[in-house]
Structures are given as structure tokens and as C-alpha cells.
Amino acid sequence: MRKHTRRRRLTMTSLIDVIFLLLLFFMLSSTFSKFAEVELSAASAGRAGNSEVTKSFLQLGEDTLSVNGQDVLPGALPEAFADIAPNAETVPVIVSLSDEVTAQRLTDVLVILRGISRLNINVLGS
């Protein structure tokens, strides 16, 4: 004589609960921040151009910042470049980095420079 076992119905309630908990976990633990891009062009050897164009030289150190040999605070960069060749359409700026400069410091300065109109920024490579 065989015993008749009653089959239990499989419930999906617990599976759905687990799926919703995982969905909530991944949604709340992920970040939805937008990363900004900073355009960067490396300085390279070029042909001789117009010698009347005033070029600026920006030296960036770990704690220092100088434009054409004069120390400047990062917030004062727009005023420093306002006086350089006010009639020129574009002002070439060559950015030189010391060995201690972090990527974050370079990015902060490039964001400030990008906000200044008429600058053509080139970063010297090592």
C-alpha cells in the first residue's frame, strides 16, 4: 500500500520579497552622479607663428601658482589673465606642472581656466 503524500503548492511570495529587497539595496547603494569632463590638450612642437601673440606661462606647484613669474591665488586667475593682451582674440597659455601636483589640483585649476574666455590652454607633459 502506497502512501499518498499531498503535494504542497510552491508559493512565490518569498521569492518576490527577496527580489524587491535586492532591488532596493542596489538602487540605494548606487550613485547617480554625473562626472564632468575637462578638455585637455598636450603642448607639442609647432611651426613658427605670429611673434606678436602674447603667450602666458602658468606654473602649477603643490601649493603654489604663478602666472608669468608672479604668484597668484587660484581665485584671482581671471583678473590675472584680464590684463594680458586685452585686444587679442586668443591668448595661448602653457601650463607647467611640478612633480608634486595632484590630478585634483590640476583639474581645479583647469576648471577655473576654462571659465575664462579667449584662453587656449596647453599642458606640458613630463
Image: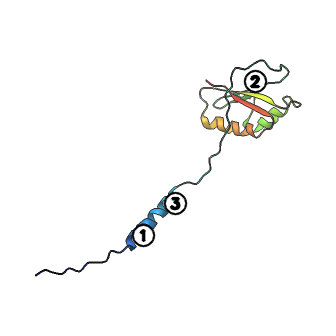
Q: Residue 35: where, in percent of width, then height? A: 62, 47
- The three-letter code of the residue at mark 3 reads Met
The foreground one among 109 and 52 is 52
Task: Report if the CB atoms under discs 3 and 1 are less than 8 Å apart.
Answer: no
- The outermost residue toward the top is 48
- The three-letter code of the residue at mark 1 reads Ile
| CA distance for labels 2 and 3 | 51 Å
Q: Under tag 1, what secondary structure?
A: helix
| CA distance for labels 3 and 1 | 16 Å
Q: Residue 44: where, in percent of width, then height? A: 68, 23
Tell me which corner region of the image, top left, top right, bottom left or bottom right, holds residue 2: bottom left
Q: Residues within 10 Å of mark 1 (few under 14, many from 20)?
A: few
Identify the image quadrant of the C terminus.
top right
Choose the circle earlier in sequence order: 1 or 2. 1
Instruction: Tell me the residue that label 1 is attached to.
Output: 16
Choose the circle earlier in sequence order: 2 or 3. 3
Q: Residue 56: where, in percent of width, then height? A: 77, 26
Which residue: 20% across, 79% down?
A: 5
Instruction: Tell me the residue that label 3 is attached to.
Output: 27
Residue 61 in the figure: left or right of residue 87 = left
The foreground one among 87 and 108 is 87
Identify the image quadrant of the N terminus.
bottom left
Which residue: 31% across, 77% down?
A: 9
Instruction: Tell me the residue that label 2 is attached to.
Output: 69
User: Which of label 2 and label 3 is nearer to you?
Assistant: 3
Q: Is 57 located above or below residue 82 in the figure?
A: above
Residue 69 in the figure: left or right of residue 3 = right
Q: Under tag 3, what secondary structure?
A: helix
User: Which of label 3 and label 1 is nearer to you?
Assistant: 1
